[in-house]
Amino acid sequence: MNSTTAERHAHIFKALMHPVRLQILDLLRNDEQCVCHLETQLGQRQAYVSQQLAVLRKAGLISDRRDGLNSYYRITQPEVLTMLDTARAIVGGDEAPETSLAVDCPCPRCSPALERPTYPLHLLSTEEIPC
């Protein structure tokens, strides 16, 4: 292995040397997640979660996309999951987490906006139409 390759490998391993970053990758295992969802699942503040996401993104392990006010992250290198699974097999521990909807997450995916009721206009006068 030449020194350039070794440096790239070290960069990836450095990005993985943090428990919260490993948790983030596990949460991204099956699907992309919004920052607010990750924040809720991890029980951490948005600034802290964003800092950890930036490290993973800089290492090329995840990417993001914006949708309105929400940022969504996904794994770009699925091979990293093999590394996580190997570590789990070596040290034991939890099975891969199930990513369920977070109760307190305000994103559209977790808290779909309630559809506004529709009213037949012929039954209501203009003063009675709810806004």
Image (spheres, rainbow, N blue to C red):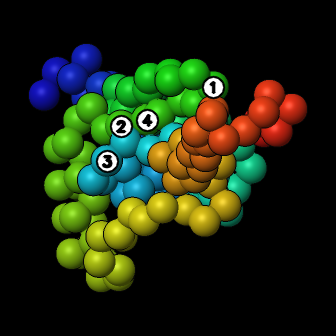
Point out the residue furthest to the left here: 1
Taking 40 as reference, is 97 left or right?
left
**Secondary structure type for disc 3:** loop
Left or right: residue 61 versus residue 125 is: left
| Residue 73 tag number | 4
Location of residue 35 in the rendering, given as x and y in whole percent from the top left corner = 57, 41
Of 97 and 3, the residue lying toward us: 97
Cα–Cα span, label 2 and label 1: 17 Å
Residue 49: in sight, yes or no? no
* Residue lying at 35% horizontally and 80% vertically, measured from the top left: 94
For marks 2 and 3, the one nearer the N-term is 3
From the top left corner, tell me how far across and down residue 128 is, in percent.
82, 39
Identify residue type, mark 4: Tyr
- Per the model, the C-alpha gap separating discs 1 and 3 is 19 Å
User: Visible in this render: residue 78?
Assistant: yes
Of circles 2 and 3, which is in front?
A: 3
Residue 125 % position (x, y): 78, 33
Whether label 2 touches label 3, CB < 8 Å: yes
The secondary structure type at the circle numbered 2 is: strand
Mark 3 is surrounded, within 10 Å at the Cα level, by few (under 14), some (14 to 19) or many (20 or more) other residues, namely few
**Identity, as a three-letter code, of the amino acid under mark 3:** Asp
User: Could you give the CA–CA distance between mark 2 and mark 3, rounded to whole angstroms?
Assistant: 7 Å
Q: Which residue is mark 1?
A: 69
CB-based contact (under 8 Å), mark 4 and mark 1: no
In the image, what residue occupies the spot 27% across and 53% down?
30
What is the C-alpha distance between the residues marked 2 and 4? 4 Å
The residue type indicated by label 2 comes to Arg
